[in-house]
Image: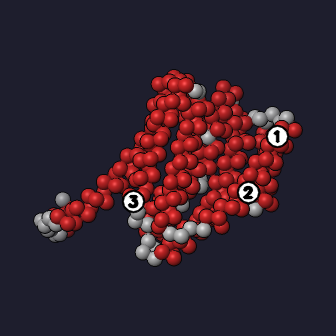
């Protein structure tokens, strides 16, 4: 109806070369998205089969909280950064500067977020949801690595797609799934929930490492400039808070203990930077 009232008539031309270009681009995007869906669904299927619906409910709470962390980090600026990378993809120096400015702050934020979840995540879940969700808190605590690496890995893959190197992003996902599927099955069969969570952590770590390698093929990244200080600051913060936690014997789910750990981690991290 709209086409008829507007007076515009579609031209019935078919260009094989244009169609081939669209399909070549489209199947990579579809493959990328399919692999994302598989990665986000396989773990829940495995947990439900091997551990039952009760544990699956606990796992889902922890997983959703981890994704909230991602949405409040890189997820909040993903569309903007992708547009920036796409705009300057032909100008390598501008592309490098745009990437480094984003990653400089994202890495620091992701590190402190992961540290906070490791020390405060379990207690915070119990404080909010109650003692019956204690296992969800323990799972969430072990997902600190996932919560930290997910925005870092996603931003790299978004950069690769925005820079016009979709095939690299696709390769990252393929290798991740090749590792992840057998790893989570082995973890579920011979281990427990903690093994399952760490199979996810390891798979996102592998994906992050591969995405870094492919990013270095596109632009000359100053990884030491981006990562050296925040990683050292993160290690110092982790060691200091762990020592204070062991000596003080604070109750994990007590609100004052959660606030104390979070404040201590934040202050140490800022000064260590």
51 sits to left or right of 177: right
Q: Quadrant of the N terminus?
A: bottom left
Identify the residue at image location x=45%, y=52%. 172
Viewer-side residue, 60 vs 48: 48
Instruction: Determine the secondary structure under disc 2.
Output: helix
Q: How many marks?
A: 3
Q: How is the image coloured?
A: secondary structure
Viewer-side residue, 212 vs 14: 212
Residue 51: x and y in percent read 53, 24
Report if the CB atoms under discs 1 and 3 are less than 8 Å apart. no
Q: Which residue matches tag 3?
A: 166
Viewer-side residue, 4 vs 151: 151
- Mark 1 against mark 3, which lies toward the viewer? 3
Real-space CA distance between mark 1 and mark 3, rounded to the nearest whole angstrom = 45 Å
Please say if 265 is above or below 47. Answer: below
Identify the residue at image location x=72%, y=36%. 123
Which numbered disc covers residue 245? 1
Counting residues from the start of the chain, the first of labels 3 and 2 encountered is 3
Identify the residue at image location x=47%, y=45%. 176
- Mark 2 against mark 1, which lies toward the viewer? 2
Please say if 45 is above or below 10. Answer: above
**Residue 193 occupies which quadrant of the picture?**
top right
Q: Which residue matches tag 2?
A: 232
Real-space CA distance between mark 2 and mark 1, rounded to the nearest whole angstrom = 20 Å
Residue 117: x and y in percent read 68, 44
Please say if 229 is above or below 149. Answer: below
Please say if 6 is above or below 129. Answer: below
Q: Quadrant of the C terminus?
A: bottom right
On the question of residue 73 being in view, the answer is yes
């Amino acid at each position: 109806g709209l086409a008829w009232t507007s007076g515009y008539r579609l031209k019935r031309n078919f260009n094989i070369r244009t169609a081939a270009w669209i399909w070549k681009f489209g199947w990579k995007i579809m493959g990328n998205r399919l692999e994302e869906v598989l990665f986000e669904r396989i773990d829940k299927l495995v947990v439900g089969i091997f551990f039952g619906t009760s544990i699956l409910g606990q796992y889902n709470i922890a997983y959703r909280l981890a994704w909230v962390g991602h949405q409040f980090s890189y997820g909040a600026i993903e569309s903007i950064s992708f547009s920036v990378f796409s705009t300057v993809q032909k100008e390598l120096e501008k592309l490098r500067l745009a990437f480094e400015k984003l990653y400089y702050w994202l890495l620091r934020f992701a590190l402190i977020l992961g540290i906070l979840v490791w020390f405060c995540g379990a207690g915070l879940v119990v404080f909010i949801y109650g003692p019956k969700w204690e296992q969800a808190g323990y799972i969430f605590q072990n997902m600190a690595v996932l919560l930290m690496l997910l925005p870092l890995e996603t931003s790299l893959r978004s950069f690769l797609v925005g820079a016009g190197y979709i095939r690299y992003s696709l390769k990252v996902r393929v290798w991740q799934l090749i590792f992840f599927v057998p790893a989570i099955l082995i973890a579920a069969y011979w281990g427990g929930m903690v093994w399952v969570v760490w199979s996810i952590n390891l798979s996102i770590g592998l994906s992050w490492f591969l995405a870094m390698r492919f990013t270095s093929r596109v632009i000359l990244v100053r990884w030491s400039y981006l990562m050296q200080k925040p990683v050292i600051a993160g290690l110092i913060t982790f060691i200091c808070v762990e020592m204070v936690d062991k000596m003080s014997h604070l109750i994990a789910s007590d609100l004052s203990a959660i606030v104390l750990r979070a404040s201590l981690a934040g202050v140490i991290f800022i000064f260590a930077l």
